[in-house]
């Protein structure tokens, strides 16, 4: 596992967080258990001290030998059971009974008890870290006051080596800290396992797929069965891959279409010129074939210009010169310019304009290009002696321009493709006169104006109307 990998960073982060949590928990438990253990010791000493207090008060009242022996016997029993040295003093602090023979020199000696004021008020006192000067050991001392009625009668002093009390705590501390370490190791393993399964492996799949797509394998997809953010990322990745595959498909189709559109006229031009140069074509036919070559060159020029226009529009580099225009005047101009094509197909043209003038906002040159393309498209698909109709009308804040021809209807399945580059509904009829770029250019120009264009069939079999909008003035 690399130090810089995501799983290493996650594992390290979570391990530190959990480790700190366990350390804090173990420390709190250690202090809590220590306090609990000392409290338990205090409660035991206090409970046993009650029996000693009863015997001591009885001895103080009777002052007999047998009561002293009874007191000493009880003190020795408690001392052995609690493993503690016990001393008993009177109300002045003078020792009169001990359990440890080494403390016998303290009998009839007055002890300097610093907490005597608290004891006289009936409050037990404990001291946890008292250094014994003679033995050098650290001791735990518990002072229990004795009362006869409301009268302070003396003190029971119980002394226990601190190491003896803390011995059981060491085992508890060991268990607590070992448990914390084991829990830390176990949680790290669990985090590593689930990080690999839930996060690292899915991200690895996405990473591998991304590298393959970068190498051109755009058909690669990621399949992750998850409803969380990773699953959403995989879905988004697949959507991106679909888009890239579509872009790649369009790119290949574009190159193929451009190659086809260029190859056909270039082949014709090459053949005609080669025939003239080689003398295969008779002299009287040279002008005829040169005219055909010229038409093919014109077709190539239209194709290149259309491609340049479309590329500029798609790249957002085409700047519009928006101004006030007369839509009716532009329509008349475009129809007159198409007069030769109209007469060639013997079409009946009906121009229906709203008013003498109909003003809108737009780029005059680009809108002439739009209307010309729509009229040319209508002429192409009209049958001989067919009908062509151009209409302008206003509706609210919009000017609507419609171009109708009574040629064959557009099949419903092809409606969504007519705006694609190089798409030709009738390839056999339009191969020589259409580049398949006219309608895409029309739509891009109108999109740049912020306007819409749509197409409708009059019936299933014939009649097609293209309609676009402009902002009315």
Image (cartoon, rainbow, N blue to C red):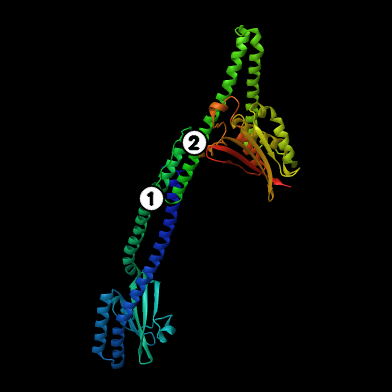
In terms of depth relative to the viewer, which is nearer, 120 or 393?
393
Indicate the position of residue 417 as horizontal and vertical percent values: 54, 37
Q: Where is residue 28 in the image (x, y as percent from the top left)?
A: 41, 65
Q: In this view, does 279 lie to the left or right of 74?
A: right
Q: Residues within 10 Å of mark 1 (few under 14, many from 20)?
A: few
Residue at 46%, 33% in the rendered image: 217
On the rendered structure, is 238 left or right of 344?
A: left
Q: Which of 422 and 206 is in front in this view?
A: 422
- For residue 224, what is the image quadrant? top left
Name the disc covering residue 2, or none: none
Q: Which numbered disc, 2 or 1, marks the residue that appears first in the sequence?
A: 1
- The residues tagged by marks 2 and 1 sit, at their Cα atoms, a distance apart of 33 Å
User: For the residues carrying marks 2 and 1, which lies nearer the camera in this image?
Assistant: 2
Q: Do the residues labelled 2 and 1 touch (CB within 8 Å)?
A: no
Q: Is residue 149 depicted above or below 123 in this figure?
A: below
Give the answer, above or below, for where 174 lies relative to 5.
below
SS category of the residue bearing label 2: helix
SS label for mark 1: helix
- Disc 1: which residue: 194
At 27% from the left edge and 78% from the top edge, which residue is drawn?
A: 78
Image quadrant assignment for residue 234: top left
- The answer, for residue 254, to whether it is visible in the render is yes
Placement of the N terminus among the 4 image quadrants: top left
Total numbered badges shown on the rendered structure:
2
- On the question of residue 134 being in view, the answer is no
Picture residue at 59% right of the left edge, 20% below the top: 265
The residue where tag 2 is placed is 245
Q: Where is residue 363 in the image (x, y as percent from the top left)?
A: 72, 39
């Amino acid at each position: 596992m690399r130090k810089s990998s995501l799983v290493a960073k996650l594992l390290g982060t979570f391990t530190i967080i959990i480790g700190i949590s366990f350390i804090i928990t173990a420390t709190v438990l250690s202090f809590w258990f220590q306090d609990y253990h000392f409290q338990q010791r205090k409660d035991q000493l206090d409970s046993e001290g009650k029996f000693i207090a009863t015997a001591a008060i009885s001895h103080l009242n009777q002052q007999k030998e047998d009561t002293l022996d009874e007191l000493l016997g009880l003190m020795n029993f408690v001392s052995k059971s609690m493993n503690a040295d016990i001393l008993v003093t009177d109300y002045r602090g003078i020792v009169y009974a001990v359990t440890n023979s080494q403390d016998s020199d303290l009998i009839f000696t007055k002890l300097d008890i610093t907490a005597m004021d608290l004891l006289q008020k009936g409050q037990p006192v404990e001291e946890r870290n008292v250094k014994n000067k003679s033995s050098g050991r650290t001791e735990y001392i518990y002072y229990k006051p004795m009362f006869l009625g409301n009268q302070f009668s003396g003190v029971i002093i119980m002394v226990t080596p601190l190491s003896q009390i803390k011995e059981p705590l060491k085992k508890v501390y060991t268990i607590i800290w070992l448990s914390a370490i084991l829990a830390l190791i176990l949680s790290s393993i669990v985090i590593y396992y689930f990080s690999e399964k839930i996060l690292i492996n899915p991200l690895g799949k996405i990473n591998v797929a991304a590298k393959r797509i970068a190498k051109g394998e755009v058909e690669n997809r990621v399949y992750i069965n998850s409803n969380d953010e990773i699953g959403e990322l995989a879905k988004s990745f697949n959507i991106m891959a679909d888009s890239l595959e579509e872009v790649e498909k369009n790119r290949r189709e574009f190159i193929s279409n451009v190659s086809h559109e260029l190859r056909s006229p270039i082949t014709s031009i090459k053949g005609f010129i080669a025939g003239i140069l080689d003398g295969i074509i008779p002299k009287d036919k040279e002008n005829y074939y040169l005219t055909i070559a010229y038409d093919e060159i014109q077709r190539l020029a239209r194709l290149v210009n259309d491609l340049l226009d479309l590329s500029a529009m798609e790249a957002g580099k085409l700047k519009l010169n928006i101004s006030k225009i007369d839509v009716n005047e532009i329509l008349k101009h475009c129809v007159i310019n198409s007069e030769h094509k109209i007469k060639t197909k013997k079409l009946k043209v009906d121009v229906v304009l709203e008013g003498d003038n109909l003003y809108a906002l737009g780029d005059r040159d680009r809108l002439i290009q739009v209307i010309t393309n729509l009229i040319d498209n209508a002429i192409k698909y009209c049958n001989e002696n067919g009908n062509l109709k151009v209409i302008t009308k206003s509706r609210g804040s919009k000017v609507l321009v419609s171009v109708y021809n009574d040629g064959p209807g557009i099949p419903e399945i092809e409606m969504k493709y007519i705006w694609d580059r190089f798409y030709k509904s009738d390839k056999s009829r339009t191969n020589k006169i259409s580049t398949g770029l006219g309608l895409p250019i029309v739509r891009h120009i109108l999109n740049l104006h912020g306007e819409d264009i749509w197409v409708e069939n009059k019936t299933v079999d014939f009649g097609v109307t293209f309609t676009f909008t402009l902002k009315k003035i």
